[in-house]
Amino acid sequence: MNLFDCFNDPFLIGLDPRDKAIIVQKLQQWGLHTQPFAMNLDNWFCNFDDIEDKRLALRIFYSLKFYSSEAFVSRLNQLYRAIERHLTNTGNTPSDIVLVTPDGAADSADRHAYDLVKNWELLQNQVYHVSELNSQTFHDPVFILFNDTHGTGNQFLREVWPKLQHYGEHKIYVLAIAISQDALDRFRKEMPRVHVIPQIPVVNARSSFTGQECERLRQLGERVYPKHPMGYGDAALLTAYYYQCPNNTLPIIWADGENNKVNGKAYTWSPLFRYLPKKINEAKTNHNKLLSHEKEQLVAVETRIKPTGKKKPAVLTYRYRVGLLDLDLGLTNVSQVAQELNKCQKYFHFTAPQNTELDAARNAVISIESQRNFSVYEINRAFFWQFDELAVDVVGCFTRYPLAFVDKHDESIRYNYISGPSNIDSRFMFVSAYQLQNFVNAAECSLEEGLVHILVSQLVVYFTDVGFHSKVKECPMDFCQIRKDIVLSLIKRQFCTNCTDRIADGFLLKALNDMLYWRIKRA
């Protein structure tokens, strides 16, 4: 796929080969070298009418720091190594870490509690809301407070710091992916002994552009979002994440004609990376319930921190959350399937997300050689963004159509597939039920069992280094060039010897086998 074939904006079409190569390289680095995002980029450049504004927009694009899901996790791991060094210096151990999150859905810090717990392998009794700290007595704790972005530091200093400062500053760590110079200066002034990581501010528009260019950015910002023309707190950041763009970033990057409303009116604009404002009332209530549920379900193999205050309830031992989503099959028992899968194994915790917006996915059905296919590569990114607050690790998406993907190597369109992940976000695994009813009938099992059988193969690919094999071995990892060959593995319901040997995690292997053997309960 030639990315520039997707563009309609004359400025982009007319770029010289060097600029085109830079754009392609950045999109490949970001994991966004796809037709949907190319259209998104094209629409964003079309916001700018003047040729000089388009050139300024190109410089903004070049200056952006975008964190893909892989880059975000990599940065979390780097922050953990920094904490490990501090722990060594202070004589503490990882079991002394106490992750502190804001009360309610105060900001994105609460959203990332699950990310840190999973990647840092924290236990349930190492995670507390701020309001819970007073009921606990800790022995030599190391308090960790994480947020993706600190643009001004106002919210942290107003809502979190007053409840923590009496613990003493020398073992409190404020971590971020991106922090502005203003926030860094305020933290140093008002919390001089608190450890702030990183200690280097993120790049912003003022440090990247001339005074004249910044003035033009402000003029454009006044038009797009007059309330905060350079981003919230006047931060002028150039940062975006795979799940959303912070509002401290320039609004001409994230405004979408809805999130930039002022007094009920919004300037029409197409975002490059969208900012998702919180639905303060309903979302806050739902988010609190979710985080409460998450804290009760976090992994706890052994108790390593023993606060002497109020005890925490017993916890379950699942390791990953899997959402199940019916895109167009009309299944009425997805919740039942999730509940039964949770009973048959304990490695994964299955959920059935409710009240999700599916139009962005359903509109991706296209015709390829007279066959309707679900084009995974054409799904709008908004479909993926809505699941960020669910704190799931992966999502299994079921559709009635065969699947079409863009090949990562030669960018050709591959279609009539049974399953596969999204190139935009590999956490989303798509499973086709096309012709599956005939196959499960032949194997004497249910449609739901067939869908789970196929999903198992995608979980293997995602969580291990085991891939599909072209040889038919009556195994879930059969590639099945002839679609009906899947009947053989549906009947046998077990991995071949080679795949069994290569799935090194015995707990994972047992869970996958339990899911293969699972039979749905009928009323």
Image (tube, rainbow, N blue to C red):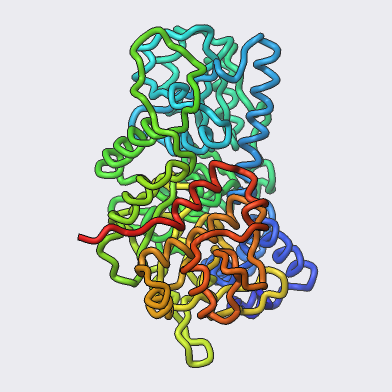
Determine the residue positioned at 44% across, 34% down. Answer: 317
Q: Residue at x 31, y 35 (%)?
A: 288
| Residue furthest out toward the right | 18
Q: Nearer the viewer, residue 68 or 375?
A: 375
Vertical position of residue 518 compared to residue 183: above or below: below
Q: Is residue 132 left or right of residue 218?
A: left
Q: Return the x and y of residue 511 as percentages of the image width and height.
A: 48, 47
Regarding residue 265, the answer to whether it shows in the image is yes
The answer to whether residue 223 of the structure is visible from this angle is no
Rendered image quadrant of residue 206: top right
Depth check, front residue: 316 or 175: 316
- Residue drawn 50% across and 52% down? 512
Q: Quadrant of residue 433?
A: bottom left
Q: Residue most toward the bottom? A: 370
x and y percentages locating residue 222 in the rendered image: 46, 52
Q: Nearer the viewer, residue 432 or 166?
A: 432
Camera-side residue of 103 and 442: 442
Q: Which part of the image, by quadrant, shows the C terminus?
A: bottom left
Determine the residue positioned at 61% across, 62% down.
Answer: 32
Percent position (x, y) of residue 339?
31, 49
Q: Quadrant of the N terminus?
A: bottom right
| Percent coordinates x, y for residue 271 in the rendering | 49, 60
Label total for image: 0
Q: Is residue 471 above or below residue 311?
A: below
